[in-house]
Every structure is written in C-alpha cells, then in structure tokens.
Amino acid sequence: MYIPIFTACALLALGAFTASSLCAAEAAAPHKDKGGAWVYPTYTFAAKKGDWTQNRNWKDNKLPQGELPCAYVDAGSSMTISRPVDLTLSSLLVRSGVSNPTEVFFKDNAKLNVGRLTLPAMGGSGANFHMEGGELTVGNVKGHSYYLSVGTNATLSAVGQFAVSAGTLRADYGVRVGNSTQGTQQGVFLVQGSKPEIFANAGESSLAFFLGATGTLTFDLDDAGVSALDARKGDFRAEAGATICVNGKAYTGGPKVIVLVRAQAISMPEGVRTEVSGFRSSLKADISVEKNRVVLKIANAR
C-alpha cells in the first residue's frame, strides 16, 4: 500500500494548516520545524496572466530565489514558463481556480527541476498544466523528492489535468493520478500525439505510475499514433473505477499495434474501464493488457 510522505508545503497543499505556520517567506534557507517537517522559503505567482520571469507577476515583486524555494501559482492565475528556470524548486503547487481552472503553460524552451509538483493544491474548479515542449524533471532533488501529483487530494473536490504534447517529462519519484476514494479530487493525465517523451520512475518504491479510482489516463492519437508512457523502471497500477481512454479521431494510418504503457509489471483489476473512440469506420481498435505492456490494437473492421 502506498503511504504518502508529507512536508510542510505538502500539508499546506492539502489545506491542513495555515501558510504562516508552515511555509515562511522570510526563511533564508530550508529548515525543519520542531516536528521534523521541512519549511521552505515561499513565493506566490499572483498575476492574472503572465510569464514566470517578470517580477511584477509575483507577490511583493519577488521572483523565487535562494535554496529550494516553494512556489505557488495563485488561484485563477495563468502562468507561462518559456525559458529555463535557473534554480531548483522544492515544490511547485498549483492552486485550484474558483470559477475557472488555474493554468500553467510550459513552452518549448522551458526547463525546470522541481522536487514536487502538485495540481490542484486546493479545492475549487481545478488546475491544468499544459506541457508543450521543454524539459521538466519532477522528484529528482535529493532529500526533497516526491511524486508528480495530479488530482490526488482526498479532502477537497476539484479536477487536476496534466497534458503533455511535446518535450521530455521525467517523473523520477513516480506519478499519481486521481484518488482511491470516489467523490474526492479527479485527476487526468493526457498524452497528446507522438512527440513527447514521458518517463515515470519508481523513486523509493516499486510503483512508477498509479492511476487511482478517480483517475483517467487518456491518449489522443495524431496521424502517426501516440507516445508511450515509459514506466519500465517500476510498476504500473490502476484501481477499479479508473479509466484508460484512447481517441483516434486524428489517426490516418492503418492496422497497427501501438504501445501505450511499458512497465516492469502491469496491475489492472476488474473494474478498470477502457474506452476507445474516434476511429474511422474502416478500423476497429481495442485496448489490451499484457504482462508488462498496455497496447492499442488497430485492425481493419470486418
């Protein structure tokens, strides 16, 4: 059974405590509180819309700086990362929008190394992360590494979506999408087309990718197919209630076997839903589970 590890910022993401008691902006460097939890210097992107690099977009005109800062994207904001971020973050926490989702756009020339990425970090309508290129590494900060969390909060209802259409994503501590309890947050991990490279590693456990009961894993094919989720350094596990979807509307090829997931082992019990849609009428497609792969089998319709 997976047991989450909470830091100060992680607990704040769950809405358990106040910011003043956990993440102190005046802290010169990360330190542990009396309970042994990490406290990080904290910064908030508060602009309605703008780029990471502009001081004016951050609360008190202060860009994240120093050692392992914890960065928040405020509720309802739309933030763009279009250049390399020249420091390592302890956490990037994307708060949920109230009426509209909070948005993060990660562009071609972007590069970021962060110990933990969580969306959404509060209840509300939700949060979306659009990876359109660049290099994003999550969970490769020694002593401060955690999983890429998409809609895993058990205490508040909202939707988190991580969509990757290009670039290289490395989740070295694993990926968690959705929660085990229905009625809590929902998570969507969306792979768009055949351009991105996606690596999910197991970190300190054996589990590289976890799809909870409120989680959805979606593959949108382009004309050639879709990129595989590479979890070969760990296991892939889905819970009953989870959904794996394939959309073939843009696919122009013929019969083919396309690998969707590679892992050391695949665990998909009864109750995991699989859905295929959008293929032209001359083709039929089915999702098939093998020992260490999930594949899409496209054949001529009879």
Image (cartoon, rainbow, N blue to C red):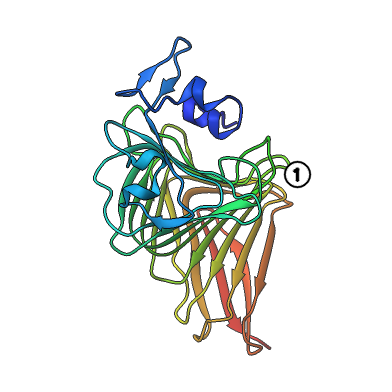
Image height of 64 relative to 7, above or below: below
For the residue marked with disc 1, what is the amino acid?
Answer: Gly
Q: Is residue 142 left or right of residue 292?
A: left
Work out which quarter of the rendered image holds the N terminus and state it: top right
Image height of 66 relative to 265, above or below: above
Residue located 45% across and 9% down the image: 34
Residue located 56% across and 28% down the image: 3
In x, y percent, where is residue 300?
Answer: 60, 86
Q: Is residue 105 left or right of residue 15?
A: left
- Of residue 169 and residue 50, the one placed in the foreground of this image is 50
Residue located 62% across and 82% down the image: 279
Q: How many marks?
A: 1
Residue located 38% across and 27% down the image: 40
Image height of 199 relative to 123, above or below: below
Q: Is residue 110 left or right of residue 145?
A: left
Image height of 106 relative to 71, above or below: below
In x, y percent, where is residue 8?
Answer: 48, 25
Q: Is residue 160 among the parts visible in the rendering?
A: no
